[in-house]
Image (cartoon, helix red, strand yellow):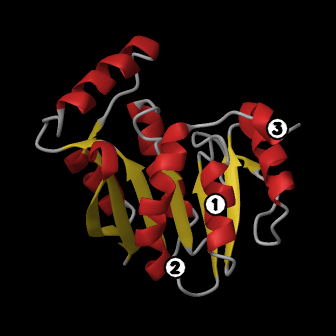
Amino acid sequence: MELAHLPFSQACENNKQPILDIIAPRLNQPLNLLEVGTGTGQHAVFFANQLPHIYWQASDQVINLNHINARIKHANLVNLPTAIALDVSQQWPKQIYDVIYSANTLHIMSRQLVEAFFIGVGQVTQINSQVFIYGPFNYQGQFTSESNANFEQWLKQHNPLSGIRDIEWILALAKAQQLTLINDFSMPANNRLLHFIKR
């Protein structure tokens, strides 16, 4: 499968460098990382290339693995193995990871799947594991921008169970898994990058 024929996200191209600028100083030693919801695979390839000391394990639903693995194969990076199947509501890997990374996933999932996501993250992390979650969030029940309010309407039209999540709820789910919010970074296009550490 040629690169030009693979699914492509312009948003991934736009946000990959701002995300790298934040995660790179915090991932400055060899670590095992699990990416949940790899999507097009653009982030996986870019970050694995920029952070050769990070073993970047991509994962997604089975339906998306063919195009993700085509991109991974084309990249041919020793620290970027074949993506694995992961449905957050099903069995998670047996392995423990130093880092969990997930971008633009929680607003796609139903509330039930967001809860399953955090339970799963709790199962595959240990003390001092880091968790990075990128995407839009609401604060005190309010949208942070008109564009996010419009995005919410678009999401609901495609899937009534999706939606931008309240940060207070996300923090409660994280706390239940011993995840402490260390930083809440403001990102381009009214997104945030949440950085947790397991205590």
Instruction: Please state which of residues 23 and 35 is positioned toward the viewer in this rendering.
Output: 23
At x 67%, y 81%, the residue is 53
Question: Relative to 56, is 89 above or below?
Answer: above
User: Within 10 angstroms of label 1, few (less than 14), some, or many (20 or more) residues?
Assistant: some
Which of labels 3 and 1 is toward the front? Answer: 1
Amino acid beneath label 2: Leu
Residue closest to the far front: 4
Position of the C terminus, as image quadrant, is bottom left
Q: CA distance from mark 1 to mark 2?
A: 15 Å
Which of labels 1 and 2 is toward the front? Answer: 1
Residue 46's tag is 1
Residue 27's tag is 2
User: SS for tag 2?
Assistant: loop
Which badge, 3 or 2, comes first in the chain's sequence?
2
Q: CA distance from mark 3 to mark 1?
A: 18 Å
- Taking the image as drawn, is residue 184 in sight? yes
Image position of 135 (left or right of 171): right
- Residue 194 coordinates in the image, percent (x, y): 34, 60
Which badge, 3 or 1, comes first in the chain's sequence?
1
